[in-house]
Amino acid sequence: MSTLPVYSWRLAPDGLATRRQLRAVGLRPGGQAVAAQVERPRYRRGPLVAYLYRTELALPVRPMTPARAAALAKANAARRTCPECRTDAGYVIPASLGMCVPCAYPEEQCAA
C-alpha cells in the first residue's frame, strides 16, 4: 500500500490537475487512480483536500448525445415542477420546502 504525495495549496507540480481543472480544458480522469492530493489549510477545521490526476493520462470528455441531452432536460424539468400544484416554478424547487414558494407559504401570497 503506497501513500499519496501531498502538496501544499498552489504548489502542486505541472502535469497534475483536479477534476475541475481537467474539465475546464475538455478532459476527464478516464478511470485513472488518484495520483496525489493538495491540501489547503482551514481555520478551526481539518484541511480542505483536493485530489489530483495526471493530465497525460486524461481522456477527452465524451460528447453530449441527443439522448443524453433529452434525459438531462427531463431531469431538470422535474426539479422545477412543484409536486403540489404541478406547475413549472421557473427555478429549482428547494429541498427544504419540497414545493414551490407560493404553495409553501399561501398566506403570504394572499397578503401581497
Image (cartoon, rainbow, N blue to C red):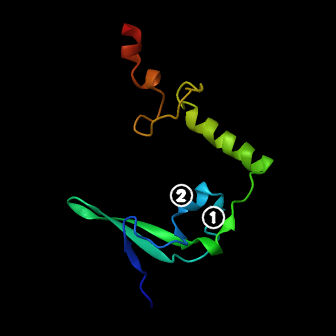
Q: Residue 59 appears in which quarter of the rendering? A: bottom right
Say whether residue 47 is visible. Answer: yes
Q: Looking at the rendering, in which quadrant would you find the N terminus?
A: bottom left
Spot occupied by residue 50 in the image (x, y as percentages of width and height) = 43, 66
**Residue 100 versus residue 65 in the image, above or below:** above
**Residue 23 versus residue 16 in the image, above or below:** above
Residue at left 41%, top 85%?
A: 3
Residue at image mark 2: 20
Q: Say what amino acid the circle numbered 2 marks.
A: Arg
Spot occupied by residue 94 in the image (x, y as percentages of width and height) = 45, 36
Task: Work out which residue is located at the far left of the displayed protein and give it.
Answer: 44
Q: Looking at the rendering, in which quadrant would you find the C terminus?
A: top left
Res 28 label: 1
Residue at left 73%, top 45%?
A: 69
Count of all numbered marks drawn on residues in the image: 2
Residue at left 59%, top 27%?
A: 88
Q: Left or right? Give the position of 46 relative to 67.
A: left
Spot occupied by residue 54 in the image (x, y as percentages of width and height) = 57, 74
Q: Left or right? Give the position of 20 relative to 66.
A: left
Q: Are marks 2 and 1 in contact (CB under 8 Å)?
A: no
